[in-house]
Amino acid sequence: MGKIDPTSPVPKYFQLRGILLELIDDAELPVDAPIPSERELCQRFGLSRMTVRQAVDHLVTEGRLYRVPGKGTFVARPKIEMPLRLVSFTEDMRARGLEPGARDLDHRTVQANANLARVFGIPVGTGVHVIERLRTADGEPMAVERSQIPATVAPDLLDTPLGDASLYDVLEKRFGVVFDAGEQTIEAGLADAADARLLDLPRGSAVLLLQRRSFMNGTCVELAVSTYRADRYQLRSALEIPR
Ligand code: GLP
């Protein structure tokens, strides 16, 4: 097990954070296991209570540990890596061995305003289907998704409720939509009251705001604006060497 190096320029709380992370990554502290008490950590690493608390607070904020009032502090599940490929929620969850689910929040057809008309390359006032769903993994809320699809592409899409079905699957099987390109932006945000309630988070919690445009033959067919739980998702990307 790692040791605290008192001569290191790295603050002691950050060193302890690193040691605890190693124990978590090596599964010496498995998911949902309690971490040693503050007192034990102080004794084992020769640190003050304040330093130990700072390290633990840091890991709680990062979502690597969670507290249960009156019980202690436990190891959280690892975060899900946000896919940076054009996959559906359903495919992504299944690939991770999680059961995808969806709860219909709203579905309606609106008239394209100037912005939607520009994005989809359709005349202003043309129908656009809006589908809002809460996406779940093994029953746990993960994201609120708001997808917009031009009605010309999938005319009677809203006639049959989607339920738990994959939107991309339905678009492909019923309407022959096969996406061949996509673009996505991801921004940090704070959950508003409505999303916080749906995602089972305290209001104002950190979230990831995704905006995806999916294309077929150079035409945008889906504009989705989604709110993902930042305590369950993280981003990882390969870094290219500049040449
Ligand atoms: C992802 C995307 C959404 C898309 C959804 C489709 O989550 N962010 O833009 O609508 O996948 O998923 P499914 O086919 O499972 O409904």
Image (spheres, rainbow, N blue to C red):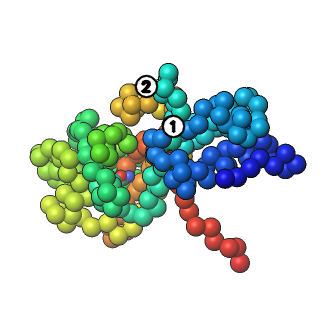
Relative depth, front residue between 116 and 179: 179
Instruction: Give the residue number, with chain letter if any, for mark 1.
Output: 34
First in residue order: circle 2 vs circle 1: 1
Give the farthest residue toward the bottom: 243
Give the farthest residue toward the top: 70
Which residue type does callout 1 highlight? Pro
Instruction: Give the residue number, with chain letter if any, for mark 2.
Output: 193
Q: Write the residue at 11% across / 45% down.
A: 159
Q: Write the residue at 66% across / 49% down.
A: 19
Local crowd at mark 2 within 10 Å, few (<14), some, or many (≥20)? few
Which residue type does callout 2 highlight? Ala
Q: Position of residue 20 (x, y in %)?
A: 62, 46
Mark 2–mark 1 Cα distance, whole angstroms, equals 31 Å
Q: Write the residue at 77% across / 38% down.
A: 46
Q: Position of residue 4 (x, y in %)?
A: 77, 47
Query: In what element is the residue under mark 1?
Result: loop
Left or right of 46 on screen, residue 112:
left
Q: Position of residue 76 (x, y in %)?
A: 48, 42
Please say if 173 is above or below 125: below
Q: Quadrant of the C terminus?
A: bottom right
Relative depth, front residue between 180 and 78: 78
Give the farthest residue toward the left: 160
Q: Is residue 163 visible?
A: yes
